[in-house]
Amino acid sequence: LTFTPRRWSTSIRRNQSMTDVAVIGAGLAGCTAARHLSEIAEIKVYEKSKRSGGRIATRFSCKHQFDHGAQFFTARSSEFKDFLTPLAELGCVARWDGRFAEYDGAQLIRQTEWGSSPPHWVGTPTMSGFVERLSDDLDCVFNVEVARAEKEKDRWVLFDTQGNLLGDYDWIILTAPAPQTHNLLPNEISLKAQVGLIKMLGCYSLMLGYQRAVNLPFDAALVKNANVSWISVNSSKPNRKNFSMLVHSTNRWAEQNMNTDLAEVQEKLFEFTSEILGFNVTSADYVETKRWRFANSVRQTDQPFFLDRGNKVASCGDWCIRGRIEAAFLSAKKLAVELLKDL
């Protein structure tokens, strides 16, 4: 299976007795699995947000845009490199050759230039743009949250949050974060317990948009020994306009403050970021804070996906391997290759 600008190509043609598959979640994992299987199965993708991408996300204001989820990605495997090549040719992804810095608290301890070893990639013109490109010719239903999945007469029946019937399917593939996947699976499904063991960590994103550029010694900065872990000049990425900054809290601080009022969280992030950068960041013209309850996961070593052939249910996502964009792709692709044997 290879990605081409128009479609994913296989030697298998559609037939009238194709398996019905529901994919829950239109992030990179969901779209990858759907595209790989779409030549041999009837695929319907359900996404609770208004667009595809998941945590590969972009938020817009009237003048600024913020990649408030994943910041960049690298490609280590040959499969992911091959996947990115045509997307780069189409202009859906581009290298971010930024100025990189490391801070120890408020002290700048290292500066360097990102180069090609390895390249740091971003979606263009938005972070989520390349995932949206993947979903273009998929049968996606947006703004619909799958809240219940039941097994009836060897078919999966799905319902939304209002109890409305969404449809029935031969197979379901769940790609939402592990806690949400766990909650959606019925108790009798064996992989429910396995998924429930995977811990995902939260994060807060502070978005700052300025009318005038701020002089900073970096485009991207890793921060250690502080409650903030990352600060970047979002507008330094390819094809971005107007000066903007993105700040991520540490997972630890977010977990300790996950149920804190968002206004209070924002004030704390102002304080932390101002101390590190040495100026009052509240002078921004645009400010917004995002709570990510399931932002990251620790490295997993057991398996890259979950599969219950007897019940015709599977699950994949970055959290099956490690909280990285490449991991989401690899998890979904490996699952799809395995499912091709059944479908």
Image (cartoon, rainbow, N blue to C red):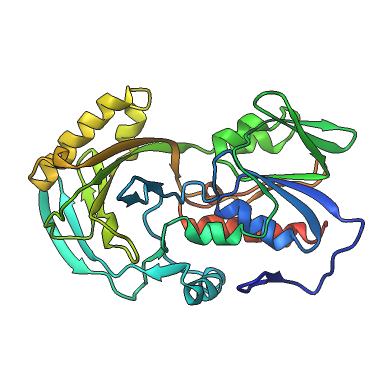
Say above or below: 115 vs 202. below
Count of number-bearing discs: 0
- Answer with left or right where residue 166 lies relative to residue 70: right
Asked which quadrant contains residue 15, the reply is bottom right
State the image coordinates of residue 338 (x, y, percent, origin top left): 73, 59
Which quadrant, please, contains the N terminus? Answer: bottom right
Regarding residue 246, the answer to whether it shows in the image is yes
Q: Which part of the image, by quadrant, shows the C terminus?
A: bottom right
Q: Position of residue 316 (x, y in %)?
A: 62, 49
Question: Looking at the image, can residue 304 be seen?
Answer: no
Nearer to us in this view, 187 or 343 = 343
The residue depicted at 16 percent of the width and 37 percent of the height is 282
On the picture, is 183 further left or further right than 71?
Answer: right
Vertically, is 161 above or below 37? above
At horizontal 26% and vertical 66% (from top left) the residue drawn is 98
Q: As rendered, which of 135 and 180 lies closer to the eye?
A: 135
Residue visible at 22% across and 35% down in the picture: 269
The x and y percentages for residue 113 are 22, 70
Q: Which residue ends up furthest to the left in the rendered image?
A: 278
Point out residue 123 in the picture as x, y percentages from the top left corner.
Answer: 43, 62
Foreground: 108 or 35? 35
